[in-house]
Amino acid sequence: MKRYLILFILAVFSLAMAVAQADLQPVALVNLTKSEPITVKQLKTEIEKYAWQSIVSRLGRVPTTAEVNKEVQNCSLETKRQILEVLINDKLALQAAERDKITVTDNEVNQQITQLKAQMAQTIGRQVTDEEFATAIKNETGQDLPAFRDTIKRQGIIQKYLLSKKQNLFASMKQPTDQEIINVYNLSKAQFVRPEMVRFSMIMIPYGADAASKNKAKELADRLIREIGSDTSKFDEAVIRGQAPNSGYQAGDGGYVPRNPEAQQVAGANFMNAAFSLRQGEVSKLIEGVGGYQIIKVTESLPQKALELDEITAPGSRVTVRQYIAANLLNQIQQETLDRASKELITELRTGNPFRIMENNLNW
């Protein structure tokens, strides 16, 4: 029996080694400035990312591991080739950028992350924590934050190289005209509606994953809710105390939150139901929110409103509908220019066929 067990272990080990070796096989060799392989494993990783994002786009939710694996298994040879072609283009551009000493610093990556956080905060109407941001990135892209940062860095290098080589195209871009902006507004007035929103002040008693942490937070939350009741002045006093060190809880202005599915996904249904059931100036009962217990007071209520061309798009924003449309039109112009520049650059980098595809290693 022992002999059979050893043979079984050896067979499993040999199979694992064979799979690992297969993953290290190159599906392409890129040699613009140096010989650099794209392995089966690298291609599989990109296919997994593609599968994850495809499911999110199609179903509107985070996929399961089984769903991603099934999508990868069903990936056609044509799709594999298309994803491989993108990898080859990226590798060619990265080699060319390295040759021309074009880089992206960690500080530039941090700036990109900060901008993405700001966009997320604007969507949900409040600041987001690092944990919330990392979760959102994972849910949308299938990547953890370090891998996502690496993607930002690589794409940043490629974009810098593209801009350096195609400056003439980008310099020739024109700004959208006033008439173009008015035409877009008139065609899509129904889209320019500010959703129902509330601004709130919050007391947040955070807790960890373990039961002891949650029980301790619940005790403090119950004490605060008994002390405050429905008295707004006592709520304000508790908010001030919460801003002192070692108070045991966090407190302050929570900003604006819109009534929409995106905000509810981040803040939780309990919070949203409570926030939009309160009148202005009213204090909530205890809410079991995402990562902590909450007590809120609504400080401003804004009804849904159709926006005029020169009205701001959201409270606290300085961007008008006119500016928003102009920015979108400019983005379209930039995207069209970027597509043209990318096609030209790819054609130039591929001249002379500085790469080779191993078709046999695509059959898995």
Image: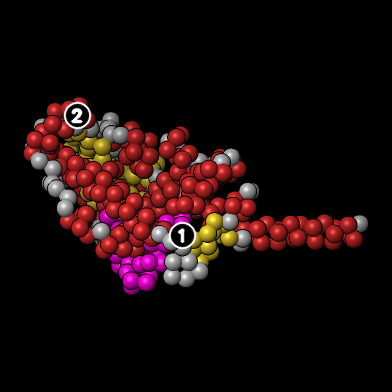
Question: For residue 57, what is the image quadrant?
Answer: top left
**Residue 315 location, x and y as percent?**
16, 41
Q: Main secondary structure of the magenta part?
A: helix
Q: Which residue is mark 1?
A: 353
Q: Nearer the viewer, residue 84 or 279?
A: 84
Question: For residue 56, what is the image quadrant?
Answer: top left
**Residue 304 location, x and y as percent?**
19, 29
Q: How many marks?
A: 2
**Residue depicted at x 33% and y 33%:** 273
**Residue depicted at x 56% and y 41%:** 76
**Residue farthest front in this picture:** 352
Q: Which residue is mark 2?
A: 188
Q: Circle 1 — which element?
A: loop
Residue 107 in magenta stretch: yes
Q: Amino acid at mark 1?
A: Asn
Horizontally, residue 208 falls left or right of residue 111, namely right
Q: Nearer the viewer, residue 68 or 79?
A: 79
**Residue depicted at x 43% and y 61%:** 352
Q: Amino acid at mark 2?
A: Ser
Question: For residue 97, what is the image quadrant?
Answer: bottom left
What span is colored magenta in the figure?
87-115
**Residue depicted at x 63% and y 48%:** 363
| Within-10-Å neighbours for mark 2: few <14, some 14–19, many 20+ | few
Residue 68 in magenta stretch: no
Which comes sooner in the sequence, label 1 or label 2?
Answer: 2
